[in-house]
Image (cartoon, coloured by chain):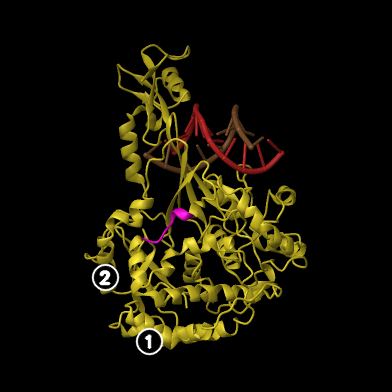
Chain colours: A yellow, B red, C brown
Amino acid sequence: MVENSPDWIPEGWTVQVKLAKNGRNVKYYFNSKTGQKFFSKNDIIRYVKRGSIHCDTSQPINMLNKRRSQNKIMPLGIKTKKFPDWLPNGWILELKTQRSGSCVGKQYKCYLDPSTGYRFYSKPDVFRYLKTIKHNSCTSRQKKVGPGMPSLGKVVIERSTADGLPAGWIKEIKIRMNENGIRRDPYYTDPVSGYVFRSRKDVFRYLKTGEISRHAFKPKNKCINVPELPNDEISPPPGAKRQKLMHQKTRRRLFSATASADTGSSEMSNLSLPENQGSRQTKQLFSKPKFALEPPTETLQEKLLVENEKYAESKKSSGRRNSDLQKDKGSKRKSKNKDCNLPCRSSKRLAGLKPDLVGNSGSSEQALAVADKISGKSEVIPALGVVMGSLDNTACCQLEVVLEAEPGHHASRAIEAPSDVEQSKKDNRHLEDEAVQEEEAGKLETGKKTGDEPELPPMDFPFMDVWSDPCLEFAFKTLTGAIPIEDNLEIEGYFQQQIDSSHTQNSSLTLPDFGLPSSQFDAQEKSVPRQHFASKPSVLPKEM
DNA sequence: GAGATCGGCAT
DNA sequence: ATGCCGATCTC
């Protein structure tokens, strides 16, 4: 496609517009005699003026791309020696380290199917799963949500953990189709502050200095699409206006604490949440920090915050800015809101004890990633062909299709358990129930920590004790193949962890928080469909 | 005015 | 091909 040449363009040159794959119109200047191409006006002017060629630009586009791709960091999806041949492409082999039990420090393998999030601890398990998948291949999740071409009027959000960023950060690529083709706009969401940044650069600047780019923004709507965010994630104030006020005051520099600035009205936020969620959901494209129904104490949020800060420090070890900011934050918010992160840092868990993620196990892979980073070692070896785009092991890659006006459509609803789950449901109803119970128990825990919802009607939970019995749980999981019997190490570790976690759990299961409107669980529940997959033992060694 | 989107430019 | 970000549009 050749455009009319502008006045300034030298003789022999033409303006050409090429439609790139991503839908963009790439304009370049082409000299048919020399075959040279320039991408910018400046370059061509400079070239004509001086007769010199500006770095890359004299080369044909293809050359540029070639060279660039050569310089690229090796993608994560590289098969390594360690990667087992039998593991399908796209799967991830995680080498994890036993963090408790009699085999602390020992490594075990974990096979992760990033397309579903299912995690297995033995080869037979993987095969069993693959077998199931085959039977249901036509409805496999991968197909359902695989990156497709969004049609006009649709927006596809490709969500994944933000590569190279601290755990918890979310990268969303908004892919949309317009007359000109497809556009892909990446956005990076800070799970802690809720800010959305438009570029990695912004993110890093933010991490380093706390400075929020003027391009960064905080999503308006209250909907939570971020499955990674735990129930007790920081909450924006109920009223957007108030938040905006806060936001403006603190926008230039803050470290992820903004959102917790509920200015002491958590009750209000509790009350206002449901309708907020109900109303403006259809246009939700971005993740919203989840409303905290209870003031979190030692929550994932802190961990993320810590993670962020750690990350920032590691990026720029010289900066002591964090402490200043924390001080600032602390002095301003501490007394007002229990949501404040600071006091909690002195908690046992943050002081080095194993993070008690049992409660969040159903909610957050990010949490797991954080947990891994904090308390354990984890090595991820993604399989060929899959670029997870993440340095952590969350392997979270989701795709959402958001229809323009589809009432009640939660973006995250697009994430469903594979249909084979349906099948396995019948066979493993018990286990599924168990999973649900566990999930609920997890919520219980988070709810209890706060002790702020005494008036909410407690849910009847007759079998809670039973489910929390590690022996029974183990039995179920063993019977259903969730735990490979051949692996003594795992069994040992599992038991040990069960015991460990049951201790922490017991101590925290006193004040159920079941007053949550069901809508509030949506994101969480949808985000962890595999919780209902019977043979998915991801809650085993890792997070307990 | 904030957020969303478009599109130019640089790499 | 992709990332960044200024400009512009929309609500």
The x, y position of residue C5, in whole percent, is 57, 37
State the quadrant of the N terminus of chain A: top left
Amino acid carrying mark 1 in the image = Glu
* Residue ID for mark 1: A492
Q: Chain of mark 1?
A: A
Q: Is residue A134 left or right of residue A397?
A: left
The x, y position of residue A117, in whole percent, is 39, 63
* Residue ID for mark 2: A128
Question: Which segment did they paint magenta?
Answer: A413-418
Seen at 50% across and 72% down, the residue is: A439
Seen at 65% across and 53% down, the residue is: A276
Residue A232 visible, this orientation: yes
Q: Is circle 1 on the same chain as circle 2?
A: yes
SS category of the residue bearing label 2: helix
Q: Is residue A321 left or right of residue A160?
A: right
Q: Is residue A270 covered in magenta?
A: no
Q: Is residue A380 left or right of residue A342?
A: left
Q: Is residue A492 left or right of residue A345?
A: left
In this rendering, is residue A518 above or below A52?
A: below
